Amino acid sequence: MNVQSKNWLEIGRLEDIPPRGARKVKLGSVTIAVFRSANDEVFALEDNCPHNAGPLSEGIVHDDCVTCPLHNWVISLKSGEPQGADEGAVRRYSVELADGVIRLCTSPIEPFNGDAHE
Amino acid sequence: MTQAINRQKLVIIGNGMAPGRMLEHLLDMDANAFDITIFNSEPRVNYNRLMLSPVLSGEKSYEEIITHDDVWYAQHGICLHKGEKITQIDSVTKQVTSESGRIAAYDKLVIATGSSPFILPIEGADLNGVVTYRDLDDVETMLVAAKSGGHAVVIGGGLLGLEAAAGLKQQGMEVTVLHLMPTLMERQLDEAAGYLLAQAFERLGITVLTKASTKRIITEDGCVSAIELEDGRILDASMVVMAVGIRPSAALAKDAGCDVNRGIIVNDAMQTSVADIYALGECVEHNGMCYGLVAPLYDMAKELAKTLLGEAGNYQGSVTATKLKVTGIDLYSAGDFAQGNDREEIVLRDASAGVYKRLVLKDNRIIGAVLYGETSDGPWFFDMLKKQTDISEMRETVIFGQAYQGGAQVDPMSAVAALADDAEICGCNGISKQTICAAIKEKGLTSLDDVRAHTKASASCGSCTGLVEQLLAYQLGDSYNPQAVTPICPCTDLGHDEVRRLIIAKGLRTIPQVMQELEWKSSCGCAKCRPALNYYLVCAWPGDYADDYQSRFINERVHANIQKDGTYSVVPRMWGGMTSSNQLRAIADVVDKFNIPSVKVTGGQRIDMLGITKDDLPAVWEDLGKAGFVSGHAYAKGLRTVKTCVGTDWCRFGTQDSTGFGIRLEKFMWGSWTPAKLKLAVSGCPRNCAEATCKDIGVICVDSGYEIHFGGAAGLEIRGTEVLCTVPTEDEALEYIVALTQMYREQARYLERIYKWAQRIGFDEIRDRLMNDTAARKAYFERFVESQKVAQVDPWEERVSGHDAHEFVPLATISSEAAE
Ligand code: SRM
Ligand SMILES: Cc1cc2nc3c(=O)[nH]c(=O)nc-3n(C[C@H](O)[C@H](O)[C@H](O)COP(=O)(O)OP(=O)(O)OC[C@H]3O[C@@H](n4cnc5c(N)ncnc54)[C@H](O)[C@@H]3O)c2cc1C
Ligand code: SF4
Ligand code: FES
């Protein structure tokens, strides 16, 4: 695992997020989108589309991807990368699901290669 | 220019398929040769009689089977007297007289009176409730009778009787077929195929009684109630269809002095025995033969056109092949298949696949073919039959079909490639492979419809459609895509229409069920297909289906429009664009209280508050709700605005209460989900200040009532509306608009605006359905009303009272310190 910090916080329970849906977690000035897939996996990405900062938490979740509500980029929840021809990356956060409780690591996963693209 | 004065007068009696085709040849060869007048007892234009069975079964509409419409006659300057029967021909003064007394002089006369159904001379045959099967009137009579259900008895197990039986069954009647002979269609089929056919009919739920001779038709209060057979059996019957054969209609010609035997006798040039009188179609007898199928009539039509233009035609008789047009039953027969000492036969049976094929040979040449269950080789056999091809080289394999010849794989493409250039593809129209391939190449044709339009191939009974498609594929290679259905998205190969049809047909009720049953390729769809499926299910099962919010675009999920910075805009309904000081005050208060950065008058006659954070939405709605506002659905694939003008309330030109009607429409229709957004407008007079003529549905009020428009666009595309109809009262206008909306809801593809849908299926088709079919219109209206019962819930109020609360608050808020 690529976790850099040990700061894990309990943020809620699985059933607080609709299946194939997302909720926001406000972490200071950063908003994190926590997704729940159809088969109850959880993922966390910064709520910030690499295209034009669209709120990914408002998108449609399908398989392990989310489609951004603003201009339909499709972002992988696993890698944080856009699918197809689009380029960029979304900052990822580690989440853990145990006994129905979701815990989030407050430091993003590094390396974050989103800045590599000019 | 045409010189009408010098032109010869051509009069045609009867406007069936044969003269229709003859005119096409004639006009092709010389459009100006004649002044043409047609008399037709049927009160309509020329249509494809072969397709009456699909009309009866409900698979096609009358409009779809028209061959020449009124415009065609007008364009060619042809005078068609519809509903006028000719009762007399005077070959001395050279004129004809119609039942209504109209007289027309001719230089050349064509008799094309077709044939008439034969009526069994039994008791009760003249009763109300006994119908024949020949023209559209018969179909309409049957359709009306079928509406009240009951039991139909079809007398006659030939082509027509069986097609009528299948159609009536599909219309919901109990159906029994009575056939005098031991097996069905005995003139075209051998016993084995006749037996398989009877079984197939039984499987369709149709009772088949062979060796059944009808004694009399029994009545009750002047209507048909039962049938008695010679053996004493009595069968219930609310309708009797008599389909026991046809007789050439030759009486008129006989009275005029033409030689008549069974039919009107013609020579190879299609001339009768009387000068300047010609005959054509089912009414003629040529070399002792009368025909009852179109292919020979089309051959005659070509020859007669030549004769009329002075180049003696040369008709040499025809060999015929038959195909039964009952969905789900494949049957083909050609030539002669009686057994005899000099004949051999080759039979192939595959019981598990329900296939039976039989070829009758004489001197190693095919003289008859019967195919059941698998008929694609029919035209190939028929071709060899007509050419008298010697088949000794392929005797062992010929029955397996063309694809097996020469050891080749079963590849349809190599099969069409192997066909001879002059092989006939379309039997009805006598179109060869060569003609089709040449047309594809020279005219750059790319679709089945193109080929139909340019060559007529597959335009009659349609049974050669598969072959024509293969030819297209063979000629165009990869650039031809026969199933040019665009899949909804990469998750499936199915198109929107198929998915909608299958949802209803298979009774699929949830998105996972659709994906499972229709073999979706992804585990839970994508952002393209899920909203579409969700809409299709909402529309198909109103009330039952639990809307899947996770499959809705964010705007429809949170009932506001997302903006580029992730904030939202809120547009409350202002019915018909009317507002009041109280409403404006309430909006002003909300704007102040929540610090809303922008307030704007929209292009849809209402007010937009922009820049509201998601968390504030429920509180904003709560305040708006207290002032009486509901959601304006400015975000919905659903009813948006109904724009109005001031109308009779204020305007000096107003003809009707356009404001009141707009409000009524909006109150009736709000809350409904539609394939794409739906915008209406009502203008009080043709000055059209509400811009109704570029809306999805618009109304222009006029002195005499309400002119209803549809299919306009003024967004990505600009197009004016077309008129649906004008109705005198507001109630009727409401009914038509609502019915139109429901038809659109049920048929359009997701995200397809009304104008796109109407362009795709045809404005006329929509008009016809809503204008000429009162029952259908009322049913659409009722279905809309039914679905509105569960649709008119204000989504804002729902959310103010806690629905979907999770949408509007973060899961957790963590201060920066805690994060460190
Ligand atoms: C607010 C408004 C502009 C305004 O300030 O006046 C507006 C705003 C938007 N329009 Fe519009 N349209 C507005 C009237 C119109 C009109 C005029 C009308 O309704 O008479 C048209 C032309 C008529 C038509 O619908 O064809 C119009 C044609 C479009 C189109 C092109 C649709 C098309 O099929 O051609 C889009 C794009 C789309 O739907 O895909 C669009 C899309 C949009 C969206 C929803 C873009 C989006 O997806 O975010 C805008 C949302 C802004 C918001 O959040 O409020 N808007 N839009 C108007 C709201 C009317 C209302 O009260 O509900
Ligand atoms: C339900 C059905 C299904 C069929 N299916 C097939 C099929 O699959 N394949 C196939 O090859 N054939 C089929 N046929 C047969 C085919 O339709 C006919 O062979 C063909 O239509 C005959 O054309 P026609 O022009 O000779 O006569 P018709 O099409 O019968 O036209 C004759 C017209 O003349 C009019 N007329 C008669 N007398 C007068 C008068 N005195 N004055 C004015 N008008 C008059 C009649 O009203 C009629 O409209 C089918 C027929 C029916 C009824
Ligand atoms: S025209 Fe409509 S879609 Fe385009 S910017 Fe204006 S409001 Fe937005
Ligand atoms: S902001 Fe996400 S696609 Fe444009």
Image (cartoon, grey):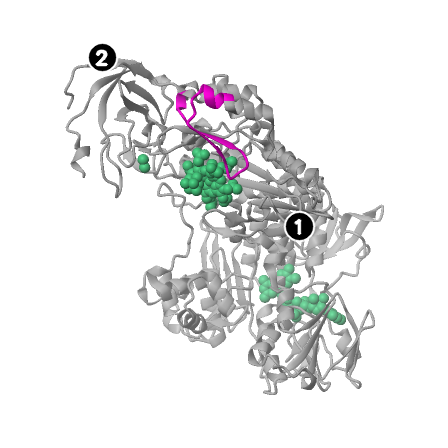
Rendered view: A70 above or below B588: below
Would you call the spot at circle 1 few (<14 residues within 10 Å), some (14-19), or many (20 or more)? Answer: some
Badge 2: chain ID = B
For image coordinates 57% across by 32% down, the residue present is: B670
B167 lies left or right of A5: right
Q: Is residue B496 magenta?
A: no
Question: What is the count of numbered marks?
Answer: 2
| Marker disc for residue B725 | 1
Residue that label 2 marks: B817
Kindly tell me whether mark 1's CB lies below 8 Å from ligand 1: no
In the rendered image, residue B451, in percent from the top left (x then y), is placed at 47, 66
x and y percentages locating residue B88 in the rendered image: 80, 76
Q: Position of residue B663 (x, y in %)?
A: 63, 34
Residue in the foreground of this view, choosing between B465 and B786: B786
- The quadrant in which the N terminus of chain B is found is bottom right
Residue B35 image offset from top left, x and y in percent: 68, 79
Q: Amino acid at mark 2?
A: Glu
Sequence-wise first label, 2 or 1: 1
The C terminus of chain B, quarter of image: top left
**Where residue A112 is drawn, which disc sits there?**
none
Per the rendered image, the range of residues in magenta is B589-615
